[in-house]
Image (tube, helix red, strand yellow):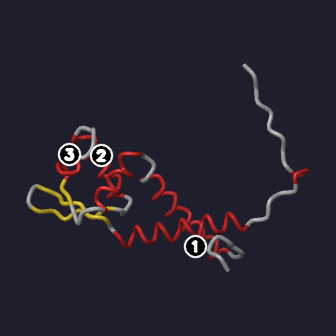
Amino acid sequence: MSETECPSTNDNRKCLSNCEELAAIFRALGHPARIAIIKQLATQEEACCGEIVNHLPLAQSTVSQHLQVLKDAGLLICDARGRNCHYLLNREKLKRAEHCSKEFWQDLNSLKPLPSDAAVPVTLKKD
């Protein structure tokens, strides 16, 4: 049985937990700068904020905010060295994100479509 099929209360909690985890990851990746940061870190072992700033057309403070969002979501690990934080990808969390995302799309694609006569018409409101 797929994790998105939830026939019992315990399964419902597990399903909701998986959905919340996936939503948190999608939120963290919901900005082009954060995706660029992830892609940059994928090409190198680690980088400090200044090195990341050099690759983006953003202010250091903005990059720091994006790094914090990614770190809070568990997608980045901060290796503190003195006053500097060296960021690296949390590859285990990214693998989990990949797995959850694939599972979500597989489950969604396996659903049977509604018959065309059961579709609800959408009416656009004109101003």
How far apart are the alpha carbons under marks 3 and 1?
A: 41 Å
Disc 3 crowd, CA 10 A, few/some/many (<14, 14-19, 20+) = few
* Direction left: furthest residue: 82
User: Where is residue 90, by image quadrant?
Assistant: bottom left
Instruction: Specify the quadrant that holds the N terminus.
Output: bottom right
> Which residue is labeled 2 in the image?
65
Q: Are marks 2 and 3 in contact (CB under 8 Å)?
A: no
Q: Are marks 1 and 2 in contact (CB under 8 Å)?
A: no
Instruction: Specify the quadrant that holds the C terminus.
Output: top right
How far apart are the alpha carbons under marks 1 and 2?
A: 31 Å
> Which residue is labeled 3 in the image?
54
Name the spot of residue 126 as percent of width and height, x first: 75, 22
Pointer 1 or 2: first along the chain: 1
Residue type (three-letter) at the residue carrying disc 2: Gln
* Direction bottom: furthest residue: 1
| Whether residue 9 is situated above or below residue 36 in the rendered picture | below
Residue type (three-letter) at the residue carrying disc 3: Asn
How far apart are the alpha carbons under marks 2 and 3?
A: 15 Å
> Which residue is labeled 1 in the image?
14
- The secondary element bearing badge 1 is classed as helix
Write the residue at 51% across / 71% down.
99
Name the spot of residue 101 as percent of width and height, x first: 54, 65
- 53 horizontally vs 102: left or right: left
Front: mark 3 or 1: 3
